[in-house]
Image (spheres, rainbow, N blue to C red):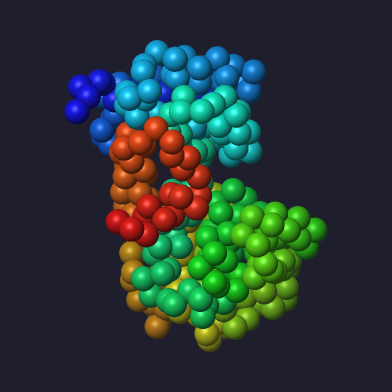
Amino acid sequence: MSDKTKILIQLDPDPQASVFDRVVAVDAGAQQVFAYSGVTLEQVQGLVHGAMFTRGPADLAHTAIFIGGSDVAVGEAILKKVVAAFFGPLRVSVMLDANGANTTAAAAVLAARKHLELSKTTAAVLAGTGPVGQRAARLLAREGARVRLCSRTLDRATQATTSVNGAVGGSRVTPHATGDEAALRKAVEGVELVIAAGAAGVVLLPAVVRQSIKSLKVAIDLNAVPPAGIEGVGVMDKAKEQSGVTVYGAIGVGGSKMKIHKAAIASLFEANDRVLDADAIYDLGKAM
C-alpha cells in the first residue's frame, strides 16, 4: 500500500478560492489541498499536467482534482478542459461541484426518493433553468419521473428542457411558464413533488397556491435565505409533516448534501480514473 500523501488540487475560477470547499476536502480525508484561484481555461492544461507528471502511474490515485467556484457554466468548461488533458493511463480523478450544484441536487432528489416512488411521480422543479434546478430535473428524469421544468418565461424553460432531455434521452421533461399566478397554478396542478431551486429572496410557491395542490406529497425548498422559496417551509425542516405533505428546508437537505460531498471527495482517492459530475455523484449518494 502506498504511503503517498493524498493531495487535492482545487481549481476555482473565482478571485478567492472557496474556504468552504477547502475545509470539506480536509474533513473528507485530503491531507493536502492546493487551492488555485482565478483559474482560467488557458491555465487548466498546465495545472492538470502538473498533477499527472509528478507521480508514477501506481500513485496517481493519491492525487485528485476538485472544480469549484460560483459559476457552474465556467466549472463545466473547466471540467472539459481537465478531461481533455488526460491521455492513456495518465489521469487523475476529478469532481465538479461548482456552487454546490451537483451535491445539492443529488441530496434533494434522494430526499424525495425516501417518500415517493419516483418512476410513478409527477414533479415540478421551480426555477428549473438554474444549475441546481436543471440537475434536479435531470436526476428525476433519470429515475423515471415526469418532470415539469418551470421558469418565469416559456422560452427559458424550453431551452433548459431541451438541454436536460438531451442529457438523459427521451422527453420526460416538459417546459412550463410560471410568470403569473394562473400559470403557476397550471404548472403545479396534479404534481406529487415540488422542488424549489430559485435564488434567495424569491417566493416561488406562495402558500395560497401550495394549498391548492391536493396531490402534493413532498415539498423541498433549497433556498436558505428568507423569505422561503416555498412559503411555510422552514429552513431547518427535515421530513416534517405539514397537513399531509412532507417538507424539507435547505438545511434539512444540507446534512445529506454534506455527507455526499465528503463521500465523493473520499472516493476520488480510491482510483485515478473517476469523473464525478451530477449523475455519478447522485449514484454515489444513492449507494450510501
Residue at position x 58%, y 61% in the image: 137
Residue 276 vertical position relative to residue 166 in the rendered view, above or below = above
User: Which quadrant of the figure contains the C terminus?
Assistant: bottom left
Residue 201 vertical position relative to residue 242 in the rendered view, above or below = above
Q: Quadrant of residue 112?
A: bottom left
Q: Quadrant of residue 159?
A: bottom right
Residue at position x 45%, y 19% in the image: 52
Asked whether the viewer can see residue 203, the reply is: no
* The residue positioned farthest toward the front in the image shown: 88
Residue at position x 73%, y 73% in the image: 183
Question: Residue 108 vs residue 26: left or right?
Answer: right
Percent x, y for residue 76?
Answer: 60, 37
Percent x, y for residue 205?
Answer: 57, 68
Residue 89 vertical position relative to residue 151 in the rendered view, above or below = above
Question: Residue 104 vs residue 158: left or right?
Answer: left
User: Which quadrant of the figure contains the N terminus?
Assistant: top left
Percent x, y for residue 73?
Answer: 63, 38
Residue 88 vertical position relative to residue 143 in the rendered view, above or below = above
